[in-house]
Image (tube, helix red, strand yellow):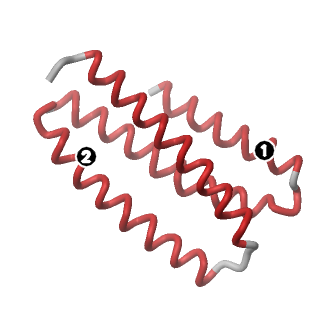
Amino acid sequence: MKLNMYISMFCVGTWGLLSAGLPEYEKEIFLGMVLPWLVSLISISKTYSVYNINPEKLIKHMTSAMLMKMLSYGLLLVIMFTFISFNPLPFIISFTGYFLALHITEAFVLKCIFKEKSI
């Protein structure tokens, strides 16, 4: 899927630019990017495949996916803050920025998927 490549290029590219401008926060920016990036790639791919196989199951999938996202974000953030030493403020800013940007992208992808086929 080309979209996964574009999302990856966006994330790695912005991380590179931000790390070049703020080299002291390279680790925090990367950690703030990687979790939303991976979750977004998995979520978009899985949603697209569920919709193509059986559109009627999409709402059930979206509900369970949201629950899994909440649990995984919470668990991984607790693990990161417990076991990895880093400056939390740049991490939180990076995480929030990537989280919002990638979830907006997911919303546009869903809109495009729904335009393709009507349920």
Q: Position of residue 10 (x, y in %)?
A: 64, 35
SS assignment at label 2:
helix
Q: Amino acid at mark 2?
A: Met
Quadrant position of the C terminus in the picture: top left
Left or right placement of residue 106 versus residue 62 in this view: right
Q: Position of residue 91 (x, y in %)?
A: 68, 63
| Of callouts 1 and 2, the N-terminal one | 1
Residue at left offset 62%, top offset 49% = 97
Residue placed furthest toward the bottom: 82
Residue at left offset 58%, top offset 74% = 80
Q: Is residue 116 above or below residue 44?
A: above
Residue at left offset 22%, top offset 17% = 117
For residue 92, what is the image quadrant? bottom right
For residue 12, what is the image quadrant? top right
Q: Nearer the viewer, residue 47 or 5?
A: 47
Residue placed furthest toward the left: 56
Q: Nearer the viewer, residue 99 or 80?
A: 99
The residue where tag 2 is placed is 62
Left or right placement of residue 44 versus residue 67 in this view: right
Q: Is residue 14 above or below residue 87?
A: above
Left or right placement of residue 89 versus residue 3 in this view: right
Left or right placement of residue 34 versus residue 90 in this view: left
Q: Is residue 31 above or below residue 1?
A: below
SS assignment at label 1:
helix
Residue 66: mark in rendering: none
Q: Amino acid at mark 1?
A: Gly
The residue where tag 1 is placed is 16
Q: Is residue 86 above or below residue 9?
A: below
Q: Report the number of numbered marks.
A: 2
